[in-house]
Amino acid sequence: MRLELTINGVPRVFEVAPEALLIDVLREQAGCRSVKRGCEAGDCGACTVLVDGRPLASCLLLAGQVAGRSITTVEGLGTPERPHPLMTALVEAGAVQCGFCIPGVILSAKALLDENPNPTAADVRQALDGHLCRCTGYVKQIEAVLNAAARLRAGKEGAR
Amino acid sequence: MSGRREFKVVGRSEPKIDALGMAAGRAAYTDDIELPGMLHAKFLWSPHAHARIVRIDASKARALPGVACVLTHEDVPRNIHTTAGQGYPEPSPYDTRMLDAKVRYVGDRVAAVAAETRAIAEQAVRLIEVEYEVLPAVLDLGEAMRPGAPVIHDEPDCKAVIPVPYEPQRNLAGHVDMQIGDPERAFAAAPVQVEVTCETHYGQHTPIEPHVTICWLDADNRLVIRTSTQVPFHVRRIVAQSCGIPVRRIRVIKPRIGGGFGAKQEVLEDLVAMLALRTGRPVKHEYTRPEEFVSSRTRHPARGRVRLGLAQDGSPQAIDLEVLVNTGAYGSHALTVACNCGSKTLPLYPCPNVGFRADSVYTNLPVGGAYRGYGATQAAFPMEVAMDVAAEKLGMDPVELRRKIHIREGQGSAVFRALGEGKSGVEQKIGSCKLDECLTRGAEAIGWKEKRGRDRHIDKRLKRGVGMCALMQGSSIPEIDMGAASLKLNDDGSFNLLVGATDLGTGSDTVLAQIAAETLDVPLDHVIVYSSDTDLTPFDVGAYASSTTYLSGEAVRKAAAIVREQILAVAAGMLGLPPGDAAKLRTADRAVHAPDGRSVTYAQVALHALYDADQHQIGTIASHITHASPPPFAAHFAEVEVDTETGFCRVVKYVAAVDCGTAINPKLAEGQTEGAVVNGIGYALTEELLFDQHGRCRNPNFGHYKILSTRDLPELVTILVPSYEPTGPYGAKSVSEISINGPLPAISNAIYDAVGVRLFRSPFTPERILRALKESGRT
Ligand code: FES
Ligand code: FES
């Protein structure tokens, strides 16, 4: 079937099987390799993408379910040359070890900060719950999201 | 101390050099490439714990459109080997074939399919017809060596390849023992005696990236293996052995890896390689999460008994440790995990009389493998609980007991000499130990004095307590492991650093680059690291045994020191100084400076050497082997809250104070500690693979095998206590493994402080805690 998606702001068209999962369309057809496969059961959070701004596990979604919607992956948030403040904060805090969980963490953190620019540590824990990370013990990830929030707030005030 | 100076790059929390690319989602991992015509592989796994394959018929699977290849034991070489990615000759027994006519656990390999799509491969796997003769199985650790127990490895060709005890007819996969002095006589005389038996359970590493491998034949018909491994050079050697092809025909590439923790020290790539060899096409195989849980590797469960004989003042007169290890269906790391039970715990408390015996036995359950802290995790539990019991008997504070009896700088231990990995060990004296300070600062951070031994009710149900333990680990395997590095100068004054060492997310590429940058007096971004490619980088044993910083780091430091000398020699010529005067030159800021103030930049030196006079490539390759395995030390403190009605135990606060020598990159060292602690807490409280009476795993998924998430996190405090290890690069020793060993004993001891019952069996689930409370009449 024909599937239209807006991926990182660009309207795209794919030919997919009706049973195709969003994770596979994104990784294999759209070239978004940042979407990671950790469990295919909705348990690990590695495959998280933003669907119209909401973080969802792409391994649990049929591609057809999100036809016409807007999908964001970390490729759409920044690049090594122009990183998103969340990327910079995670790197600087030492919160990226193997990095496999990081794209999902960034997207859920972005969704949190879009809604609540001034989160508490408890808010961050809540937002990142379900993003399994076996490397870092989460301490530096939570710290990094709080740092990024502060930086984004300062940036906005500066712009005012 | 020689070599100690102010550092410029070492000791700084430089951002991990590969982190930004990962955060931006750059395609970097094994599965992030797509090759034209790539096939997808799926394996058929055994449904039985122990069975002979009487008949296997793959004709229907082969006939399915889209299937390119099906392999059963009838189609592949039967080269016996071990999957343990260890140095040659391996201390693990040769008891594994690519595919066999016998299966030994639920989840063992039966057959493999390569097809155009994953869906077709899955369908083909279901079409393979297998007739099994089901055999009686060994599903209990204690049953394995009973006379008359089913023999799991009855094939005639399994064998140990080094001279160690190996008796498969008794299901004995590995054995080690040693004795120092006369423990029994000392026990008889010791006024204070303690005996503790603890049992640990099946756990799994759960790297968030499961094992994944892509194999293809290149233009020269060589086999390229792109794989999530911690041991690329062992993969090359062992795949060659299993497939029966020459090592020179294989290239192993390790791209970015999504975590390993020891699971990826196993060589499981051979079957994917064989599919690529047979089809001539690229083949990808990725473990699903349930497969990762059951059919990759696990933590060896163990039962360990510690006996302590102490004088009234607490000094050890006799220590005895006896361990029974369950290696599962194959003997991967069976012997070395047993050795480590002794070698990573016994030297911590010097004692004139020490006994140690350990058996590793086969069962028809999933295969044990290397898992961060192996041996130490299993043995530190009974040892440190026994110390807690001893402190109570002696009327001493547990912190003060450890402070009094732990090993100190300048001391040796007969255990170091007696226990190696499958052979005797290497004598060493402790060159750095700040355990004393770890104990002090850790106790302070948890509030030990105020909290320990107090009845602390939060309300009627909830009680709090604190517990602690002391730990040691090693740094590399002395006189066995080797790491090498090559370094060359580029025409802009930057350097290519090529290392066989394997960064699996730990940050070792960054740490090694920092060591090179420090030695060469350049900023970190002038060192370009490429690691773990068997065609291009020099040899390294790989990422295990807490070796990379200490062992490979010293190889890098050596290579950098040699290259620096070469730069000085060329610079001396450029500055018109006699070659003997090179020693008077100094390096700083990417340049060589003469005493008279003149200088030449590294870029000028490089251009001169490449284009001008006496043209040559400035560069070298250096190797390092260690003659010591300096232990890092740690003191861990846990505060728990136990619900006496439900048995639920929550860790409120956890403090890890660690002496890892110089932390080359403090943030990365903290990150290693935090990750290890959280993994250890999960193992202590919630993570457990469960099996039914047929040996089938009941919970191979994250829904039912609960690893900690952000909401379960206690307040976590990491304290790096600096020391300077004279044999390590810039004073460094290891950090990655030690802290996973603390939570079992620290939490068990804290539960005792809170509610007065001891937990000797992990994990400390609400049911077990409640049962212990009921049995003690404390609810
Ligand atoms: S892969 Fe989707 S949640 Fe794990
Ligand atoms: S950094 Fe490895 S899983 Fe999170």
Image (spheres, coloured by chain):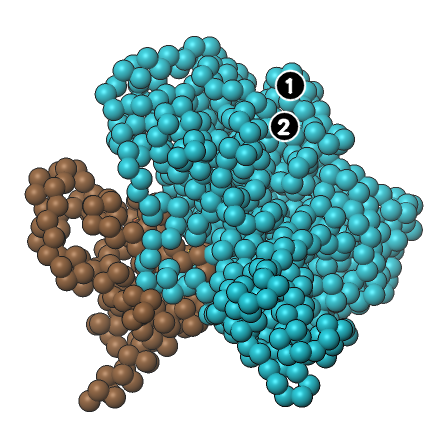
Chain colours: A brown, B cyan
Q: Could you tell me if residue B639 is visible in this image? A: no
Nearer to the camera, B210 or B247: B247
Mark 2 neighbour class, 10 Å CA radius: few under 14, some 14 to 19, many 20 or more:
many
Q: Which mark is residue A152?
A: none
User: Residue at coordinates 32% horizontally, 62% vertically from top-left?
Assistant: B24
Q: Which SS class for mark 1?
A: loop
Q: What amino acid does circle 1 point to?
A: Asp
Q: What amino acid does circle 2 point to?
A: Tyr
Subunit bearing disc 1: B
**Mark 1 beta carbon near ligand 2 (under 8 Å):** no
Task: Work out how far the residue at label 1 is from the one at label 2, CA to CA, in angstroms.
Answer: 8 Å
Could you tell which of marks 1 and 2 lies nearer the N-terminus?
A: 2
Q: In which quarter of the image is the N terminus of chain B?
A: bottom right
Q: Name the residue under label 2.
A: B94
Whether labels 1 and 2 belong to a single chain: the reply is yes
Q: Do the residues labelled 1 and 2 touch (CB within 8 Å)?
A: yes
Nearer to the camera, B86 or B520: B520
User: Residue at coordinates 65% horizontally, 40% vertically from top-left?
Assistant: B87
User: Residue at coordinates 31% horizontally, 73% vertically from top-left?
Assistant: A85
Mark 1 neighbour class, 10 Å CA radius: few under 14, some 14 to 19, many 20 or more:
few
Q: Could you tell me if residue B538 is visible in this image? A: yes
User: Residue at coordinates 43% horizontally, 52% vertically from top-left?
Assistant: B256
Instruction: From the top left corner, tell me how far across and down residue B652 is, in percent.
Output: 50, 67
Instruction: From the top left corner, tell me how far across and down residue B655 is, in percent.
Output: 57, 68
Q: Which SS class for mark 2?
A: loop
Q: Name the residue under label 1.
A: B157
Q: In which quarter of the image is residue B330?
A: top right
Q: In which quarter of the image is residue A127?
A: bottom left
